[in-house]
Amino acid sequence: MTIRFYTRENFVEWFRGNREKPLVYEDEGVRSLHFGCLEVQSSMRLSDPYNLELSYTQTMMGFLLFISEPKHILIVGLGGGSLSKYCYRNFLNSRITTLEINPEVIAIRDDFLIPKDDDRFQILQTDASNFLAQSDIQADIILLDGYDAEGLPASLRAESFYSHCWRILEPGGVLVANFLGNDQFLSDYLDRLYSIFNRRVWKSKAFEGTNLIAFAVKDENYTPHWPSLVMKANMLADRYKLDLPKVVRNMRQSQFRSETK
């Protein structure tokens, strides 16, 4: 059973004895999912439930700089459904498949107004690592946001997992990975992506907070043409209400720092 809508005081008291349970907490018009930590995992503003409330999710939409009309978006980790809902609402010609291992998280989908499954939207209760290892599914975008109570699971940061992601991506496809910027093993995860994607990896800090978003492109010949990316970012920014020009600046600065080390 999922606990819902505590006051702040009761929330903290409940949490101390129930670290493994998802909890839905509502405050000042924002409904949030907490799971295994007091930090927010997902948030939804009740007045605009399909908007991306947290800045790291907004930054992850930087895949639009590479592919502006995705055919199939595969999402690892449901949480409160922010990424899944946004993609479903904004990319009307895209199929959206979300993989979530925890049935208790899927059980609260109605609390976050996550759409019902239909011919282009599906939530699968499965271990993403095992699923990708065995599946012949293909996608042109993969969004990785599969955190649990302990952080990023070992199976979702293994080199074999990133290899499976590379395999199922269409040529020219993009893997977008959300990392915690203070993770002591962050450089190891990035090194695995660099190796598998032949260093076609660009990074952007989230607009707020410490999250780091990595964009890995399955194209050994791809090299960013920064003026063109700036133009594309400006063109798409108003349409999707995203600060995509800032993502471009962050990626370019990150590449420059890597090249000058």
Image (cartoon, rainbow, N blue to C red):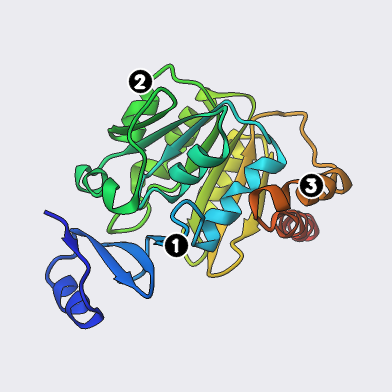
Residue at (50% x, 23% y) in the render: 168
Image quarter for residue 45?
bottom left
Disc 1 secondary structure class: loop
Disc 3 secondary structure class: helix
Q: Nearer the viewer, residue 44 or 10?
A: 44
Near mark 3 (Cα within 10 A), the count class, few <14, some 14-19 or many ≥20, is few
Q: Quadrant of the C terminus?
A: bottom right
The nearer-to-camera label among 1 and 3 is 1
Is 187 above or below relative to 18? above
Q: Point out the tag, 1 or 2, that comes first from the N-terminus.
A: 1
Q: Position of residue 42 (x, y in %)?
A: 39, 59
Whole-number angstrom distance, CA of label 1 to CA of label 2 = 40 Å
Residue at (39% x, 36% y) in the render: 98
Residue at (58% x, 25% y) in the render: 71
Q: Position of residue 13 (x, y in %)?
A: 15, 78
The nearer-to-camera label among 1 and 2 is 1
Q: Nearer the viewer, residue 60 or 225?
A: 60
Q: Position of residue 152 (x, y in %)?
A: 38, 52
Residue at (62% x, 35% y) in the render: 197
Residue 235 as seen in the image, left or right of residue 155: right
Residue 200 as seen in the image, left or right of residue 60: right
Query: Which mark, by number, is residue 47?
Result: 1
Residue 56 in sight here: yes
Q: Nearer the viewer, residue 223 or 260?
A: 223
Q: Which residue is mark 3?
A: 235
Q: Point out the tag, 1 or 3, that comes first from the N-terminus.
A: 1
Residue, far right: 227
Q: Are marks 2 and 3 in contact (CB under 8 Å)?
A: no
Q: Which residue is mark 2?
A: 134
